[in-house]
Image (spheres, rainbow, N blue to C red):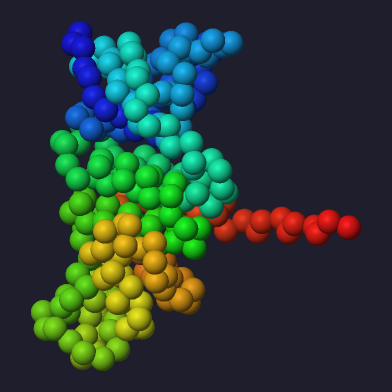
Amino acid sequence: MAIAKSEALILRVIPFRDTSKILTVYTAEQGLVSLLAKGVRGPKPRHGAALELFAVSDIVYYHRSGRDLQLLSQALLLEPFLGLGSDLGRFAHASAVLEILLRVLTGQEPPGRLYPLSVRTLECLETAPVGALPAVFRAFEIKAVSFLGHRPELDTCVECGRTFDGYPGFAGLQGGVVCHDCVHGVDGAWRISPECLGYLRRLLRSPLVDLFVDPAPQPVQGEAARVLEMFLGLHIERYEPLRGLRLAETPRPRRVPAA
């Protein structure tokens, strides 16, 4: 049995018996890890907020090869991201980030860019203007799928390889845009607006903080969201509609004016 240490993002928390928790965490060093945290629930819980959803913590655990559930030893809170619970939209989009990670990670991923991207996305969702939350989340989606080896081609036709002008098409199975001459000959391709293509390029290439300003019109955001949902569904094996986003779309109660 070896002792392992890593910074980790808490993705899922399940109460276990009376005093313990089963955790799914995304570690910066070992990828996805399942942990049993004994004796951490109760009037005076051990480790406090270090084992709550969205928290980034330094953890120490006992690792045994061939065992699905490792034993947590220590946890030190680095960042609780408490602001994500201050607004339904922030909480919903942050929950969707965790959902995606739970579906795309398989365990033992080598250190790469997806872990820091995930933490940076939560930072931005905590502080971004409410109107920018969808853009920050969609940028996380398209950047994450790119880091996983499925970067969409947004500049040249995936069928003929030419740079094109005019009204583009998109072929999700083939992995990107198609030109006017090829769109009718590519199975499953459909037209998208030039504005949608420009927005997808911005999501892929811009730092997350740059998306806080100049939001795209709602129709363009909606079109881009449909393109990304379809693209991820084709290229991510366990992808399905995200519950967190359904929560974000829940109508908020209207405030009754004081008499």
Q: Is residue 18 above or below residue 172?
A: above
Quarter location, residue 213: bottom left
Decide if residue 125 is in sight here. Answer: yes
Left or right relative to 160: residue 217? right
Circle count? 0
Image check: 241 left or right of 105?
Answer: right
Q: Is residue 7 above or below residue 92?
A: above
Whether residue 230 appears in this view of the structure is no
Q: Where, quadrant-wise, is the C terminus in this rendering?
A: bottom right
**Which of 235 and 248 lies nearest the eye of the viewer?**
248
Tell me where residue 5 appears, x and y as whole percent.
22, 19
On the rendered structure, is 251 left or right of 207?
Answer: right
Give the residue displayed 24% in from the left and 76% down from the top.
177
Residue placed at 30% from the left, 20% from the top?
59
**Which residue is pictured at 35% across the width and 18% down the height?**
75
* Residue at the limit of the structure toward the front, as seen here: 259
Q: Residue furthest left?
A: 161
Name the quadrant of the N terminus. Answer: top left
Above or below 103: residue 136 = below
